[in-house]
Image (spheres, rainbow, N blue to C red):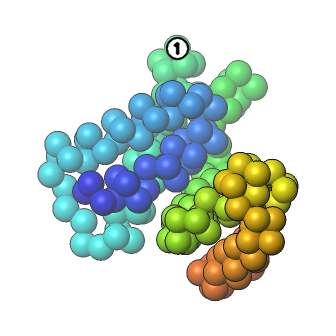
Amino acid sequence: MEDYFRKYYQSLCYFALNMVRDGDLCEDIVQEVFVKIITSGVEFGSELHFRQYVYAAVRNQCIDHLNELNGGRTVTLGDVEQVEIPTADECDMAIVRAEIIRMVRDAIDSLPPRYRQVFRMAYIDKMKSEDISEALGISLNTVKVIRQRSKVRMRELLKDFYPLLFIFINQI
């Protein structure tokens, strides 16, 4: 369960954040779901079964919270302007986005330390090569080579998901 927690925690928080729009609350919801799973002793036959279960559990916890915000009564169509409960399709899209983000993070984490550092600075922090060179105390040419090699490596790691990345790149 600890491995599942480490692997899925950030994706589940992102998924919950899309529903409840509160960073602290989404973390509380995800942690609460994991506590319930651990204390219930439920067993999962596969990682796929776990993933389906945990996303559904987080979605349900988010909806329960949104219902509580609405005074403890079930949200009706008239309340949608006050409290937006995502549709099933929106939940599915949030799951896909969260999983894509998890895969990208896993791929970044698998890069060698120096490549990972330069990749994050260049593509996540959007730093210029000159600034990276100065910050790390390495030559500009070295930064350019590492950037290119890390980009090639990321393409290799994510080759099966490349079409999905283009579809969701503006939404991530």
Residue lying furthest top: 71
Q: Image height check: is 172 above or below 34? A: below
Q: Is residue 99 visible?
A: no
Q: Is residue 164 left or right of residue 85?
A: right
Residue located 63% across and 32% down the image: 21
Q: Image height check: is 167 above or below 172? A: below
Front residue of this view, candidates 162 and 86: 162
Looking at the picture, how far across and down is residue 55, in whole percent?
A: 45, 54
Residue located 76% across and 57% down the image: 133
Q: Is residue 1 left or right of residue 75?
A: left
Looking at the picture, how far across and down is residue 81, in whole percent?
A: 75, 25
Q: Which quadrant of the view contains residue 28?
A: top left
The N terminus - image quarter: bottom left
The C terminus - image quarter: bottom right
Category of crowding for the residue at label 1, using alpha-carbon neighbours closer than 10 angstroms: few (below 14), some (14–19), many (at least 20): few
Q: How many marks?
A: 1
Label 1: which secondary element: loop
Q: Image height check: is 13 above or below 172? A: above
Q: Is residue 90 left or right of residue 36?
A: right
Residue located 41% across and 59% down the image: 7
Residue located 56% across and 61% down the image: 105
Q: Disc 1 marks which amino acid? A: Gly
Front residue of this view, candidates 57 and 15: 15
Q: Image height check: is 16 above or below 100? A: above
Q: Which residue is mark 1?
A: 71
Looking at the picture, how far across and down is residue 104, in whole percent?
A: 60, 66
Front residue of this view, candidates 44 and 160: 160
Q: Is residue 26 visible?
A: yes
